Image (cartoon, helix red, strand yellow):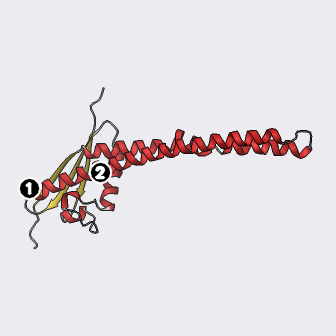
Amino acid sequence: MTPPSSGLIELRLSHAGQLFNTMDPSPFHERDLDHDAEEFIVGWAREHDALSELKVRVVLPGPADPVVAAQITESIRHYFDYRSRITGRDLLELFREGRTTLAIGLVFLAGTLALRRLVPGDQPWGSWIREGLTICGWVGLWKPIDIMLYRWWPLRRQQGLQRRLSEALVEVVYESVAPPR
């Protein structure tokens, strides 16, 4: 068995503010990440295999500032934990929608099958209507089947990735800036 690969995600920024959404008035450690920064982090996290331990390294110029480093670490973890919880709620809502549409679909199927019995079968147009009602009844179950079989998987995967990012090691590295010549 091979050990998990290093899941390093490195962001090089000119200042810490680039990491955050400038429109968000929340305190520094609770602010939303900038959309581009989030896409970059998530995109690179997807590149690593599911067993790799993710590590986010933020590289900033200038002298080390432990307060800013701690705030960045807390912000990244807080943001992806929040996104994971939101995705979990979206998943619950999707399953609720699936159950509701399944109940509606089954009632609709029962109704179309009952109507089908009322259409006389001895007329040439009767068989078309009977088959049409049968097809309509089964098509009414399309959405719940789609939800229950397929649509929840991407949300579950997204939530898992967000959870991994919320638990990732976050490292802030400061590089000295070379004086201009």
Disc 1 element:
helix
In this rendering, the count of numbered labels is 2
The residue that disc 2 covers is 82
The residue closer to the viewer here, 43 or 89, is 89
The mark lying in front, picked from 1 and 2, is 2
Residues tagged 1 and 2 counted as in contact (Cβ below 8 A): no
Q: Is residue 5 visible?
A: yes
Mark 1 or mark 2, earlier in chain: 1
The residue that disc 1 covers is 66
Image quadrant where residue 142 sits: top right
**Which residue sits at x=92%, y=39%?**
122
The residue closer to the viewer here, 28 or 140, is 140
Q: Amino acid at mark 1?
A: Pro
Q: Is residue 173 visible?
A: no
Q: Name the side, left or right, on which 151 lies relative to 112.
A: left
Quadrant placement of the N terminus = top left
User: Residue 24's x, y, as percent?
Assistant: 27, 66
**Which residue sits at x=35%, y=56%?**
39
Crowdedness near tag 2: few (<14), some (14–19) or many (≥20) residues, C-alpha within 10 Å: some
User: Residue 119's x, y, as percent?
Assistant: 84, 42
Q: Amino acid at mark 2?
A: Tyr
**Which residue sits at x=80%, y=38%?**
117
Q: CA distance from mark 1 to mark 2?
A: 24 Å
Q: Name the side, left or right, on which 18 lies relative to 66.
A: right
Disc 2 element:
helix
User: Residue 6's x, y, as percent?
Assistant: 25, 40
